[in-house]
Image (cartoon, helix red, strand yellow):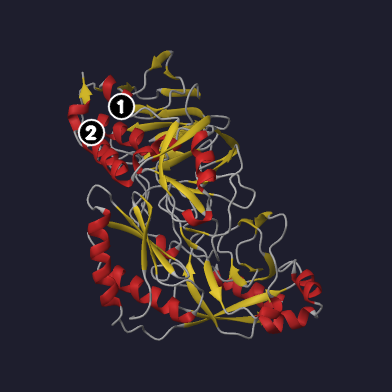
Amino acid sequence: MPGHRVTFRAASDRSLLIRLGESIDLDTHRRVLRLLRTLEAHPVEGMIDLHPAYASILVVFDPVRQDPGGLQAALRIRLAESEAVELAPPRLIEIPVCYGGEYGPDLDAVARFHRIQAERVIELHSRPVYTVYFLGFAPGFAYLGGLPEEIATPRLDVPRARVPAGSVGIAGSQTGVYPFATPGGWRLIGRTPLRMFDPNRASRMSLLETGDQVRFLSIGPEEFAAIERQAQ
Amino acid sequence: MMRVHAPGLLTTVQDLGRPGGGPLGISPAGAADPVALRLGNILLGNPPHAAALEMTLSGGAFEFEEPTLIALTGSDFGAACEGRRLELWRTHEIPAGGILQIGGTASGARCYLCVRGGFAVERWLGSASTHVLSGLGGFHGRPLRKGDALAIYPSRAGRPRKRIRPEVVAAVSPRRTLRVTRGPHSNWFEYATVRTFTSHRYTVTEDANRMGLRLAGPALATRGGGQMITEGVSLGAIQVPPAGQPIILFVDQQTTGGYPIVANIIAADLPSIGQLRPRDEIRFEMTSFEQARRLIIEQEMLLGSGEDLLCE
């Protein structure tokens, strides 16, 4: 959009970083999303992958087929085209979460950190409608914006060697769901029985995609078990 | 069919990877030393995307039910079949019931076992590569275990014995001085810090795998070039966390990262990362984007010469 400073920066000899803004906000996010949709629909010559993030897209290209100057010129055309793209209204995905106990071993610590009750943490976490800014880090891992500042909590000093799949965590003012059992340093406050990433799902391999809206629903252990059984 | 008698330390099915998954957070995976894999497939007359086994630091024991033409490429792990030592970079006929015994490495980190036809593994997003951390792709998304049986695609018989020309092997041999281009966050590093990075040796630590390689050496100070927000990261990026010890992002990498990047290893030298072992010492040499592009075009021209790379 006119007035927004866009910069192109070589990240390597086979990738170019397009920065569309310098902050985490919904307006910048929508510009990233419009450019992402444009490039997915109309790839430029030599482009082989896209890594979107909060305010940027990394374009990976084949350096044999394309030179950085030619790539940048082609991307500028797409950038101009992207300004006219109408984004579809976002989908709202509801994610049931069993908070606390074995499902969220750090819930009490997060409550103590903010000197509030655990119930209040749950209330604050499950109230907002979050936005999926992008997927990154690992397959299907959604970076969500919209966590209330009252429950923003620093990462663990020592990351866990293994975080169970479906764990819902807080790291600073970010919140997210681990799609796989991986090492991780986020404070775990709950867990969802949903499969966040399923390579065999015909569509929506990743339950969450860039641009989606998300709400967490607090559920009990019985409901967790019932949904988990249904999912298998 | 090939049966696994002993799987080695970490043996996975790999091909040239699955680029294009970035918007879903999926990194391409694929062979850690794709040049070695490609030369193996060229030797066997396979399509470039045929899947092979990638062995890490140690081999294993593999039995072939039918007579199979194979090739071993990458680093020499000391392979033998029925008491006969098998050289790297050439085709070998394994008889029906033959057991291939592969030892431990004497040089680099990875050896490739390529078979004529390629391993018949279900492709996910167009690739047979295994992404170890997330358990996706390859053979049931995991490293091979004792007792696994892998099917091999049938192929036309009658492939003459071939080997890769020695001068080609020499031209693509792994480098210990890795050439880099400047990173996208140069305002985070003083000139003197970049000098430190390119003028000292760094040691590969034990924490080195397909996701990334942690290095040990002179710490690199970051000066805080403003607010750092998570951005897409590229293969071979050299991240610098607050403690100052650099990390090279590798084939099973995270697709985005929040640490400043001091430099990025050039495309032509990425395969060399796949041959680095813990305790190996490496250096970094800054080069221009123009030179980096000349080098990858040169490498691709060499690898694109197909049968001209071979001799009897």
Residue plotted at (66% across, 54% down): A162
User: Pointer 2: residues within 10 angstroms few (<14), some, or many (20+)?
Assistant: some
Name above or below for residue B72 compared with residue B184. Answer: above
Q: Does any portion of residue B254 appear in the rendered image?
A: yes
Instruction: Estimate the spatial distance between the alpha carbons at disc 2 and disc 1, rounded to whole Å.
Output: 9 Å
Task: Give the farthest residue toward the top.
Answer: B83
Residue B170 placement (x, y as % from top left): 32, 23
Which residue bears the numbered disc 2? B302
Residue B218 position in % (x across, y down): 60, 38
Judge from the rendering whether residue B308 lies leftward or rightward of residue A175; answer left or right. Answer: left
Q: Please give the name of the residue rendered at 58% of the width and 80% of the height, measured from the top-left corner.
A: A146
Check disc 1: other Cα within 10 Å, few if <14, some if 14-19, many if 20+. Answer: few
Name the residue carrying label 1.
B171
* Residue B312 in the image: above or below residue B180: above
Mark 2 is on which residue type?
Answer: Leu
Disc 2 + disc 1, Cβ < 8 Å:
yes
Q: Mark 2 lies on which chain?
A: B
